[in-house]
Image (cartoon, rainbow, N blue to C red):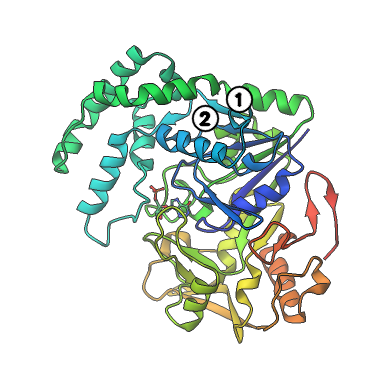
């Protein structure tokens, strides 16, 4: 048995798609355990670039079984669109390799309507900057116990009743926001052809995960968003609505926590954030523009320019603690090429003194300032490096510094967007390839 959780250690967009795709070569099953189409996992295959929002990143590997776990919220229109796009690109067997939890919750058009109306009605300082994909309202429906589970697609009559009940609960909200309440029958009529496509793939995916582990298959549990966007452990209320952390993998995939062997945390060599909320190491200067332009830091779902900043080590250590990170995948190291110096936040000065733990609930407090260590930059391109020794000295020193300060070994370093542009130091499904 081996199972590996891949979790974002920052505010999402750490490059999970590529890392999952690399390790998935060695996995039999890939399970996405949380979130929905707010995620945008970019996969680069040769010169072809594909952004998947719902499908697990392993979907391009022939022979890999992909699972949408019960911790997810699934927009049926988006999902069928992704399936069709992959079929257009020649992945004809995709439906045979896909299992969808019948307990995952559906995102319906009114969830998107409410998300959008709500965001635009809030004053700027309170708006969350959501992706407007209906994530919050769909999870709210779930915990209010008026949500619609994917299994209900099997019986459209029952589904109509459930949508009516959900709409009844939402009607006062929609009306107060100035929207018009949709009719359940119309929603179900639009869902009917999608249901026909999706129902054959619905199943108890906890059983799929359990059987895979029982038969010594290698299972990848793919997170979405990141630790600092987690509903419990993130920068609340500027978070998403799901359990993005590694613990969420047990719940969202339907396995016991003792079935997880390894947790890999993914961090960029710098930091980014989309949407609102505190970001103490944010840059508003030339270095920030460099990170945005060279790193192509624009939202893959929304196209929004991402906020950019220096790497935050207290935040990384926090992520290590709340996820139980065994090793780090360091992405986008190549983006730092050309910066004369690189800063890394190593602690915070607060009105009460210097702290090395992340003061997560006080990140917006006036008087809180990051303490930086300044490291040497480098000018050489990194994309052709395949082992650490092929990196320039200053880049190697950066990796080592990070590893020590984050108190977690680096398993992998990504030096370019392509699959091949990677230094793999450790593969949890196989073993250690190179000792840094
Ligand atoms: P929601 O998940 O659409 O409700 O958005 C809540 C917050 O999470 C917003 O700040 C979004 O920008 C952020 N967010 C959601 N999904 C992602 C992601 O995949 N990457 C980065 N930020 C995300």
Residue drawn at (33%, 12%) of the image: 157
Give SS at disc 1. helix
In the rendering, at what x and y percent does residue 97 appear? 63, 29
- State the CA–CA distance, disc 2 to disc 1: 8 Å
Residue 42 lies, with reference to residue 312, above or below; the image says above
Residue in view at x 44 percent, y 24 percent: 150
Q: Residues within 10 Å of mark 1 (few under 14, many from 20)?
A: many
x, y percent for residue 344: 59, 75
Q: Which residue is mark 1?
A: 206
Q: Say which residue appears at 43% left-offset and 56% top-offset.
A: 235
Q: Earlier in the sequence, mark 2 or mark 1?
A: 2
**Residue that mark 2 sits on:** 70
Q: x, y (%) of residue 408?
A: 71, 59
Q: Tell whether label 1 touches label 2 (CB within 8 Å).
A: yes
Pick whichever, 102 or 170, lies toward us. Answer: 102
In the image, is residue 102 above or below residue 45? above
């Amino acid at each position: 048995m081996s199972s590996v959780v891949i979790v974002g250690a920052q505010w999402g967009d750490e490059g999970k798609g590529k890392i999952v795709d690399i390790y998935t070569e060695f996995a039999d099953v890939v399970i996405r355990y949380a979130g929905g189409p707010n995620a945008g996992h970019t996969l680069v295959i040769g010169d072809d670039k594909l952004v998947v929002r719902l499908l697990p990143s392993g979907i391009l590997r022939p022979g890999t079984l992909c699972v949408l776990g019960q911790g997810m919220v699934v927009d049926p229109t988006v999902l069928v669109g992704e399936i069709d796009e992959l079929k257009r690109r020649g992945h004809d067997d995709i439906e045979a390799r896909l299992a969808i939890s019948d307990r995952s919750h559906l995102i319906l058009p009114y969830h998107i309507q409410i998300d959008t109306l709500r965001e635009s009605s809030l004053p700027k300082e309170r708006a969350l900057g959501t992706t407007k994909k209906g994530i919050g309202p769909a999870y709210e429906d779930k915990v209010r116990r008026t949500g619609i589970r994917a299994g209900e697609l099997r019986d459209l009559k029952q589904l109509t009743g459930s949508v009516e009940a959900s709409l009844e609960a939402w009607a006062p909200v929609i009306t107060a926001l100035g929207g018009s309440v949709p009719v359940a029958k119309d929603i179900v009529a639009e869902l009917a052809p999608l249901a026909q496509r999706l129902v054959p793939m619905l199943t108890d995916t906890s059983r799929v995960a359990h059987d895979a582990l029982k038969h010594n298959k290698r299972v990848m549990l793919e997170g979405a968003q990141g630790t600092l966007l987690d509903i419990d452990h993130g920068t609340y209320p500027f978070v998403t609505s799901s359990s993005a952390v590694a613990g969420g993998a047990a719940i969202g995939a339907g396995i016991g926590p003792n079935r997880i062997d390894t947790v890999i945390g993914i961090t960029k060599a710098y930091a980014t954030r989309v949407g609102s909320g505190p970001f103490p190491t944010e840059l508003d200067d030339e270095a920030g523009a460099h990170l945005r332009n060279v790193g192509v830091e624009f939202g893959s779902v929304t196209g929004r320019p991402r906020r950019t900043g220096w790497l935050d080590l207290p935040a990384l250590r926090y992520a290590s603690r709340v996820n139980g990170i065994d090793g780090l995948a360091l992405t986008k190291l190549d983006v730092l090429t050309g910066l004369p110096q690189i800063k890394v936040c190593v602690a915070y000065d607060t009105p009460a003194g210097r702290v090395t733990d992340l003061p997560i609930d006080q990140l917006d407090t006036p008087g809180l300032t990051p303490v930086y260590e300044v490291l040497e930059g480098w000018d050489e391109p990194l994309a052709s490096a395949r082992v650490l020794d092929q990196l320039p000295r200053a880049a190697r020193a950066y990796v080592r510094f990070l590893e020590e300060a984050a108190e977690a070994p680096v398993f992998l370093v990504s030096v370019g967007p392509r699959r091949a542009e990677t230094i793999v130091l450790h593969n949890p499904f196989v073993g250690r390839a190179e000792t840094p």
